[in-house]
Image (tube, rainbow, N blue to C red):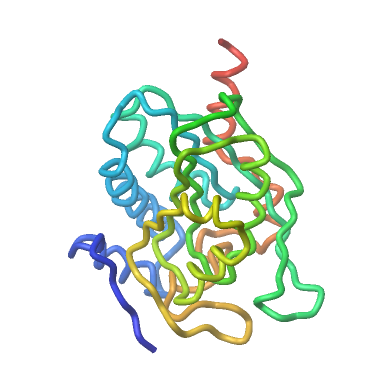
Amino acid sequence: MTRKYSNLANENVRSLLDTLTNKSVESELYRKTIFNIGLSLGDAILAEIPNQQSTVYLACTVEDADFLARGILSRLEEHLNAVAFACFWNQRFSPFEIEDLKVAPIIKKYQEPTNREVNYLIVVKSIISGACVVRTNLNHLIQKIEPEKIFIAAPVIYHTAEQKLKSQFEKDIYDKFKFFYFAEDDERTEEGEVIPGIGGMIYDRLGFQGQDDKNSYIPELVKSRRSKLMNV
C-alpha cells in the first residue's frame, strides 16, 4: 500500500485524513472531520477562482451534502457572489459484480436554476474510486450546463481514477478538468473499498444504514436552500 499526498495536503489536512482512517472514530466526529476537510478543499478551489463575480455551480451526492459539500460551499459563499447547487441521489450497483463495471443511475435530484453558461462547474465526492458516480452526474450536468472549467474535488482518489474518468469523455470536455485531492491510494479490496481511503464505506462511516437508507435521506442543506428559493 502506498499513499501519496498532493501538494494541497498540509499538516492539518493530513491529521484530518488520519482521523477519517481511524475506524474507531464515531460517526459524529467523522462527520465533523469530513466537514472540516471540505473547508480545506474549499480554500484550495477558491485559490483557482480569482474573480468573485465568477459564476459557479457545485454538485454533490446526497451522502456528501451535509458534510463535505457543506464545508466547500461555505468557503465559496464567503468570497463569491453566487453559487448554485445541485444534489444527486445515485443507486450504485454492478450487473456483473465487477467494481470497474459499476453504474450509478440518478434516482432523484435537486437542481437549482442557473444560466446555461457558467465559469466553473465543481463536482464533489468524498472519494473517487471507479468514478462511476462522478461520471454519471457530470454527464447529466453538461447536458444542461456549458462550463468553461470543470473542477473534480475529493479528499482521496484511487490512483487510476483520474485517467479512468478522463477516458469516459471527449477531449473537449476532459481538457476542462482540474482535479483537487489531498491523497492518492493504490490499494483496493475486492469489494471496491480503497485502502486506507477514507476509513471504510462512506455510508457506514457517516452513520447511514447502507445505500437504501442514504437514498431516503433529504439533506438539511437541500431543505434550507429549497426553502430560500421558494421564498424568493
Q: Percent from the top left, x then y, of residue 47?
A: 25, 43
Q: Residue at x 43, y 64 (%)?
A: 26
- Left or right for 218, reference 85: right
Question: Residue at the left extreme?
Answer: 11
**Whether residue 71 is situated above or below residue 99 in the rendered picture:** above
Q: Nearer the viewer, residue 216 or 189?
A: 189
- Toward the right, the furthest residue is 95
Q: Residue 24's quadrant in the figure?
A: bottom left
Give the camera-side residue of 198 and 160.
160
Outermost residue on the front side: it is 172
Answer with left or right where residue 9 lies relative to residue 218. left
**Relative to residue 121, is residue 11 depicted above or below?**
below
Q: Is residue 141 left or right of residue 181?
A: right
Residue 25: x percent and y percent? 39, 68
Q: Position of residue 83 (x, y in %)?
A: 45, 29
Residue at 54% over, 27% down: 225
**Residue in view at x 49 percent, y 41 percent:** 121
- Give the residue furthest to the bottom: 1
Assign the N terminus to one quadrant of the image. Answer: bottom left
The quadrant in which the C terminus is found is top right
Question: How many numbered discs?
Answer: 0
In the image, residue 16 lies at what x, y percent? 29, 63
Q: Residue at the spot x=30%, y=44% of the render?
A: 48
On screen, 221 above or below 19?
above
